[in-house]
Amino acid sequence: MEQVVQESYAAALIRRIEDHTARIGVVGLGYVGLPFLVEKAKVGFHVTGIDRNPQRAEMVARGQNYIGDVRDEDLRDIVEQGLVSTTTDFAVVADLDVIVICVPTPLDINLSPDLSYVQGVTAEIAKYLRPGQLVSLESTTYPGTTEEVMKPLLEASGLRVGEEFFLAHSPERVDPGNARYTTKNTNKVVGGHDPVSLEVAVTFYRQAIEHVVPVSSAKAAEMVKVYENTFRAVNIALANEIALLCDRMGINVWEVLDAAFTKPFGIMPFYPGPGVGGHCIPLDPHYLEWKAREYNFQTHFIALAGETNRKMPEFVVDKAARVLNAARKPLNGSKVLLLGMAYKSDLDDYRESPAIEVYKLLQRAGAEVSFHDTWTPEVNEHGVHATGVDLTDETIHGADLIIITTKHSDVDYAGVVQKAQAVLDTRYATRGIASEKVTLL
């Protein structure tokens, strides 16, 4: 009698992934999750978005976009094709084949990792976990999170990783506002808990992303992401430190950097500024710094870079006081207008923006502070609750000092300089504008 060989859970899932009948779930519909959902649906997968925020879930279900890196028409098209559904209920996990986690991983006030979002959604997934599913974490975290935090929670279901379900880490590499590199064409690093999980995860990611880079473990994949952002944090800190030194020496740091970056080898452009912002650079290196203590290892570069970058808002305020002092005006009582609250050019995201800290420090010094930013007209973070002002001739001339904290393409900086009393430019937005009114960082 001929023996019937049962298809393994991995083989069955790979087959469903390759023929695009696998049902995909994306947990967290923010800057990472929604673009990922769209890319998967665009290649024919049915994708379910899971978000605890009912407003977000309803907006996606209606095809209403709120993420700048997602094209409005792309979201509308996949919704109209019936390829997207959304929910706030994790019970849908039982009907899915692949669950991708894209939730926040913040730091607490002591710069220690806060994995409550990852732990919470993993525990919810575990309630409905069934054989033949892949769970992949995309949230940036310290090396070991997937195996040390997620695996025990998932295996509490009674299922065995690598045999009955599969577990991987594939760190997000979203660069908000980058028109050239998107979710689809940014190389995707993937690490599995075990060889079978890696095979399943690589097969999954290859369906919608142009180039997948497998690594030996989930821990290695986690290290890749924190190294990438640590690299940037350290080099930005170096540029900031050079700016601080050039300020004391009376040297134009921007002239120095422009000249240095003409060298065709051995150097890479990094620029100073009022600090670092966004969810990645100010936070991610400290995940590695925290984890290193477990191995009695001190990450000196990370600590020093964080210290240097965090003190830049204070330097900006100090320099603002010097500019006003030169005009025989005290910072206390002066009207200061910040141009830009977003952490990055042409982006509607003010998470961890250094402009917020500059705003707070100026207020603490007694200045009358206002801001203008068409990308982020309202700010509510870290104790700052403010609404922006229109950039009118009266607003510009009425300020004793204008500080450029974000370089947006929709601002006429030449016009601002012409009408302003004094300008402190922390982003070199006034490049090519010759005026004694302008002081560079």
Image: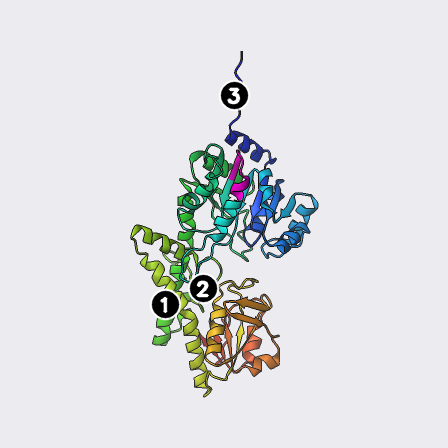
Residue 372 shown left or right of residue 324 in the figure: right
Element at label 2: loop
Magenta region, residue range: 125-134
Please state which of the two labelled residues, at mark 2 or mark 3, is closer to the viewer: 3
- The residue that label 3 is drawn on is 5
- The residue that label 1 is drawn on is 241
Residue at x-position 44% and y-position 81%: 321
Instruction: Report the Cα–Cα distance between label 1 and label 3.
Output: 65 Å
Three-letter amino acid code at the position of disc 3: Val
Three-letter amino acid code at the position of disc 2: Val
Determine the image quadrant of residue 269: bottom left
Residue at x-position 33% and y-position 51%: 294
Element at label 1: helix
**Relative to 96, residue 423 above or below:** below
Three-letter amino acid code at the position of disc 1: Glu
Instruction: Report the Cα–Cα distance between label 2 and label 1.
Output: 13 Å
Question: Residue 173: percent from the left, percent from the top?
Answer: 49, 51
